[in-house]
Image: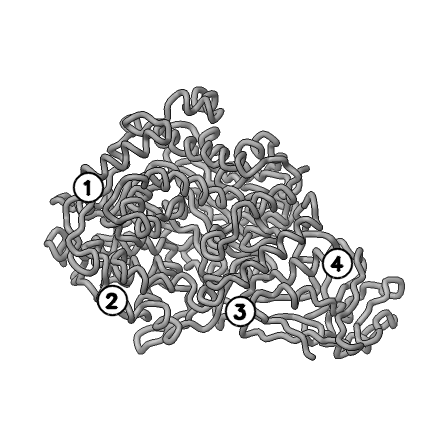
Amino acid sequence: MINSLQPQTDGGRLLKILKNESRCTGCRTCQLICALSHYEENNPKKAAIGVRGQFPAPGGYKISLCTQCGKCIKACPTGAISNVDGVIKIDEDKCDYCLACVEACPFDAIFVHRDFRVPFICDLCGECVEICPTKALYWRQ
Amino acid sequence: MKGGYAGSILRVNLTTGEAVKEPTPEDLIRNYVGARGFIAHTLYNEVPKGADPLGEEAKLIVATGPLTGLFIPSTGKAHVGGKSPLTGGYAEANFGGHFPVELKMAGYDMIVVEGKSPKPVYILIDDDDVTVEDAARLWGKGSFDSEAALAERHGEDFQSCVIGPAGENLVKIACISHDYGRQAGRTGLGAVMGSKNLKGITVRGSKAIPVSDIPGLIEIGKEMYRKSVQHPAFELWQTYGTSSVTNWANRIGVFPTRNFRSGYFELFTNIAGPAMNREIVIHNKACFSCAMCCGKYSHVKTDDYECYVEGPEYETTAMIGGCCALGDIKDIGYANFLCDDYGIDTISGGSIAAFAIECFEKGIITEQDTGGLKLSWGDPKAVFEVLRMIAFREGIGDILAEGTRAAAERLGRDSQDFAIQVKGLEQSGYESRRAPAMQLSYMTSDIGAHHRPSWAVTHDLKTGRETVEGKAEKVIELQHTRPLFDTLGVCRLPWIEMELPVSDYAEAFRRATGLDLSEEDLYRVSERVWNLTRMFWVREFPDFGRSYDLPPKRITAEPVLSGPTKGAVLPQEKVDALLDDYYARRGWTKDGIPTEEKLKELGLDRLVREKG
């Protein structure tokens, strides 16, 4: 990751990102800003948030977003994943790309790209919340 | 390589099965910028004069622009071009969605499909790997099933555009479909795909789109999104999309009704935005990077039918609702679904269905032609059945599948007078006898009677619905501005509805590409492309001129039957005055042909001399 961004906080308390899928239009602007902010690349395939259309039926979108549930931490056989002050982090040196975390994630919120040797995950920077034109993403105060 | 561009052009020859990559030429970028510009140049330069639009020499071009896929609002656009089997002239249509950004991320600014496959195939693109795959099992399937089957086979991270049975059957109003409801609808490009035995194109890309100034792009992108969501019309657009136009169009009498006999449909409140939202809309559905989101997704269910469909958009509501007098939004929704699944353009499809109903009413076609089916205004089952007969070229559908102009020539008995088309392309959803600038827009559009290059109804309202003075000047201004978005590879709607200024797009272009083209330079490109597409028509038709720009007789001689514009015609002398002024301001001859000087001024003289 080129830019390691700080999670958003409010009075010292970590802010979490919530989703309202009924408001999502599938525009994927969240993915654009995520990749631009972290990798300085116009490449929505490097976003740590997923948007999947449910077409032709039943319509609508599924948003894949890390909830910091920690299942990936338990699933990781090399101890590469940890919760650092409320944010899930993957240690590049310990990760051996077995993808057990990707399998274990109940929210499809751990991502891979062929340019990277480790999976990547949301760091709660909140750029997506700020740009989302329909407030499908919002802060839990 | 310049930022903004993926860097390569992909040529796929379906006769040989070969795929070749070429660098996107620097001079093509400078002189034609992208998407529409690339198509106009490639078509004029590479397709020989007089080529059969459905023959082996014809080409199908899919092109993106320098802003396609980038972080500014509504960059999910690709344009498709070729020689139109419907009009014989310049053909261009576009679709939004997610295919265009995927294509660019796979590394391609444009695909040029050449030759003709001996059997049904689709093109599979996975970044640098390009193959031509067997499509035997897809052939005959509807658009929805075809797209779903490709996603099933290759994965949901692939994006596809496909044709339905209409394209396979070389129906001349066949469209190309993507994302379960987005179409490159106009000018029959689906038939060009069908003629090549090409069922679809499926693509996945993983690469970043190069950008010259990333912080600069982020800055202007954020600014453009901020302006959009803070615009007073943003909520309205999110709520209704293009269907917000229906009420307004009826109130001012431009809603095409009963094949353009009227500009007012008495049942319009049943089919306008609020009714649509109440009865069928279930979700919003945007194209890539779009904030305003005109797409509405619907679930239509009655005792007779059930479907999921994107829309209906305003144009579909106008051409299938108003034009065929269907006063129930569910019926329009289902007809929309049928068109999408067959792969028929809803604008031409609605227009032709209305034309058929009028022919039936006048005894020009009878139950013998329709296989016993009675056609009448407001009968949804008649419309559903006519659309099916067109898609499969059954009975009278075989004649109607050629478009209203050709059908009227065949059927005769003055049916040409109410075949509502210009240059062979059915007029889209604005009755314009009391909107001279809009009618001039239809008359001079470079694909035939379509509103994409110039939409001038509000200008007519503002400056006088009877006056012709000043209208040509406005139409030319619009014909350079709106197609500029088609050249940059972005949607024009945020400019119109969220009032994002052209200067923002010019700035985004400079930051993305690092090219020093100014806003004025971009307008110059737009004028160059407009003159080149005009020269394509000139080249293809030895008698091309003013007569090709005339509207059908209904517009000039038959008064509007009802509503706010009752009694209106646009008399021939006004039509002549509009064209005189338009040609003079464009630097064209009195017969509408670009002059030597004009071509020279725009740097087109050599190309026209060599390939004309």
Q: From the viewer's perspective, is B547 left or right of A31? A: left
Q: Which of the two labelled residues, at mark 3 and mark 4, occupies the earlier sequence position? A: 4
Q: Position of residue B340 (x, y in %)?
A: 39, 59
Q: Position of residue B579 (x, y in %)?
A: 28, 35
Q: Which mark is residue B424?
A: none
Quarter of the image with the N terminus of chain B in it: top right
Residue toward you, B75 or B95: B75
Q: What residue did someone put label 3 on?
A: A54
Q: Are marks 3 and 4 in contact (CB under 8 Å)?
A: no
What is the C-alpha distance between the residues marked 3 and 4? 28 Å
Q: Which mark is residue A38?
A: 4
Q: Amino acid at mark 3?
A: Gln
Q: Amino acid at mark 4?
A: His
Q: Position of residue B473 (x, y in %)?
A: 36, 38
Residue toward you, B139 or B432: B432
Q: What residue did someone put label 2 on?
A: B381
